[in-house]
Image: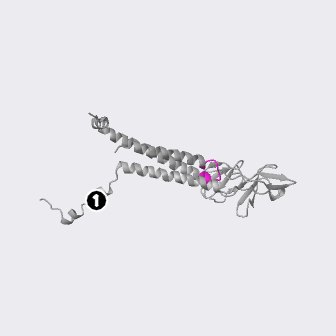
């Protein structure tokens, strides 16, 4: 049986499938537009970096006396400001290392409980205690390292190395 | 008499248009994926305080965009 078209279809001759059809040419143009957007995003990051004020090196800060940290122990302190927790680790009599305490994954506090690894308990990230590089787990970057200076039996934090 | 060589070529190999369109689309996809990777790498480096990545990444992303834009000329009608 032949179906006749309703009269309104003649007045509005729009085909739904044709309306939603995206040609390959249109798709290619959309890809170029996306490419332009990504280029603008990259420029935005470069501009943000260019406008970012150059950070002055943090001043030397007294962490404590050498006697406060026994061999194989960890001491918590704040550096370079009060909102930035850090840890000082005494590995041997003359070997001390210090790192920012925020994990580079999601900023959980990292801990050292002896051995060769600093541990982030949140997602099982592990860092080398000697230089802070990532041994395992999700952290994408090493821990920020804090250079130390020992003078007259006192330990000073003298910088921040990302 | 003027001979339309382009039309003749199109008629003799009708599949060519398809191949060119598919090739251009694939190359554009590669550019976009590379730029996406550059953007995430630049953002990651910026947040980590590394100042050496953002500008070269922006330059390469710009080159990718220009190449992608140039490829549009080769899209068949």
Residue at figure coordinates x 63%, y 50% from the top left: A141
Residue at figure coordinates x 34%, y 53% from the top left: A22
Q: Is residue A82 visible?
A: yes
User: Which residue is at the far left?
Assistant: A1
Quadrant location of the N terminus of chain A in the rendered image: bottom left
Give the quadrant of residue A120.
bottom right
Q: Which residues are magenta?
A: B44-54
Tell me the residue that label 1 is attached to.
Answer: A16
Q: Is residue B46 magenta?
A: yes
Residue B72 on image: x %, y %:
41, 45
Check the image and report above or below for B14 versus A24: above
Residue A58 on image: x %, y %:
75, 57
Mark 1 chain: A
Q: Is residue A104 visible?
A: no
Q: Is residue A100 magenta?
A: no
Check the image and report above or below for B66 versus A5: above
Label 1's element? helix
Check the image and report above or below for A27 versus A7: above
Residue closer to the observer: B36 or B59: B59
Check the image and report above or below for B4 versus A141: above
Residue closer to the observer: B15 or B73: B73
Residue B9 on image: x %, y %:
30, 35
Residue closer to the observer: A157 or A92: A157
Residue A108 on image: x %, y %:
64, 60
Residue at figure coordinates x 81%, y 59% from the top left: A64
């Amino acid at each position: 049986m032949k179906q006749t078209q309703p009269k309104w279809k003649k007045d509005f001759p729009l085909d739904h499938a044709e309306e939603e059809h995206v040609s390959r040419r249109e798709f290619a143009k959309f890809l170029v537009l996306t490419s332009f957007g990504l280029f603008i995003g990259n420029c935005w990051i470069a501009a943000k970096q260019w406008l970012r004020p150059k950070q002055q090196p943090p001043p030397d800060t007294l962490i404590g006396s050498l006697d406060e940290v026994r061999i194989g122990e960890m001491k918590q302190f704040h550096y370079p400001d009060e909102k930035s927790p850090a840890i000082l680790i005494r590995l041997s009599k003359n070997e001390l290392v210090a790192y920012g305490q925020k994990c580079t994954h999601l900023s959980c506090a990292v801990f050292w409980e002896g051995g060769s690894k600093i541990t982030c308990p949140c997602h099982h990230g592990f860092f080398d205690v000697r230089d802070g590089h990532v041994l395992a787990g999700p952290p994408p970057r090493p821990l920020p390292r804090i250079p130390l200076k020992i003078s007259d039996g006192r330990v000073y934090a003298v910088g921040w190395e990302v | 008499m003027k001979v339309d060589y382009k039309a003749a070529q199109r008629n003799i190999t009708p599949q060519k248009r398809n191949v060119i369109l598919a090739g251009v689309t694939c190359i554009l996809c590669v550019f976009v994926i590379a730029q996406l990777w550059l953007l995430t790498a630049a953002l990651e480096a910026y947040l980590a305080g590394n100042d050496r990545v953002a500008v070269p990444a922006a330059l390469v992303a710009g080159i990718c965009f220009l190449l992608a834009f140039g490829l549009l000329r080769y899209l068949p009608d």
